[in-house]
Image: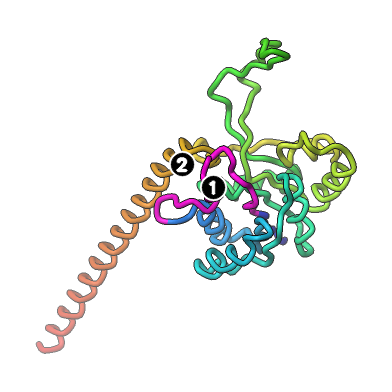
Amino acid sequence: MKCTAIILAAGQGKRMKSNVQKQFLQLGEYPVLYYSLKAFQDSPEITDIVLVCGKTEINYCKDAFVQKYHIDKVSEVVAGGKERYESVYQGLCACHKTDYVLIHDGARPFVTEELIQRGLDCAKKYQACAAGVPSKDTVKIIGEGKKVVSTPDRSHVWNVQTPQIFEYHLIKEAYEKALMHDSSRITDDAMVVENYGNHEVWLYEGSYKNIKITTSEDLEIGEIFARETYDKKSEKNEKSILTNKKADGIINKLHMSEAKKAKK
């Protein structure tokens, strides 16, 4: 079974109020986009990656990410469109004979291999699913003048994230139908399948750490998460080094013991 990750990195990041696009900003040790690419690169479930970026950033992405960090699962780097849904469709068109696609925002750097696996398990069962977490806040539906119209039961409200995972032909055909209509209100891929795919969409458990870097405040929170991740990896590496040293010490003692026995 072939699984292709489509990573979206064509956003302009206007809310970040920075001259640098949010996915290229530095976050801890690496740029924001690196973390997503690395997670899908390391997942044994992912066959290849289609990276969607701005037309003028294609060579930059190839040099600064694919080659620099040896992300060899990237099979295509393609130009996106003005809107997210246009970029997704370009990514879908660049896929080569795949079975499932995992559509992920490149500005969500804290996706993990475990989250990817949970999503694929769900997609294999239901063919259409999205990561999500229960809403921590009460949500209000408003009308004109910001007048509250209703308050949905919070137990039924989830915040949706990415990866959003679909059987390839299902999402491709749904997008083709959607693009024949006014697509300006499309905000995620699940919405496309809900409206044009004639198929139910299911949610699987995401993570509250799987945030999208949209504002400078998100970047500050992301710095903390990145530091925690880096510290854990460093601690794990240190433990591994210590374990190896202990193993070497035991082996050396055994060799010395054998040598003494041989002399006797």
Residue 39 among those drawn in magenta: no
Stretch in magenta: 7-29
Q: Amino acid at mark 1?
A: Lys
Question: Which residue in the structure is indicated by mark 2?
Answer: 219
Residue sitting farthest toward the bottom: 263
Circle 1/circle 2 CB separation < 8 Å: yes
Q: Residues within 10 Å of mark 1 (few under 14, many from 20)?
A: many
Left or right of residue 227, residue 37 in this image: right
The residue most toward the left is: 264
Q: Position of residue 116 (x, y in %)?
A: 59, 49
The disc label shown at residue 22, or none:
1
Q: Nearer the viewer, residue 162 or 256?
A: 162
The structure residue drawn at horizontal position 49% and vertical position 51%, both measured from the top left corner, is 25
Could you say which is closer to the camera, residue 40 or residue 36? 36
| Label 1 element class | helix
* Residue at disc 2, secondary structure: helix
Residue 30 versus residue 226: which sits nearer the camera? 30
Residue 51 position in % (x across, y down):
65, 59
Q: In whole angstroms, how far apart are the C-alphas of marks 1 and 2?
A: 9 Å
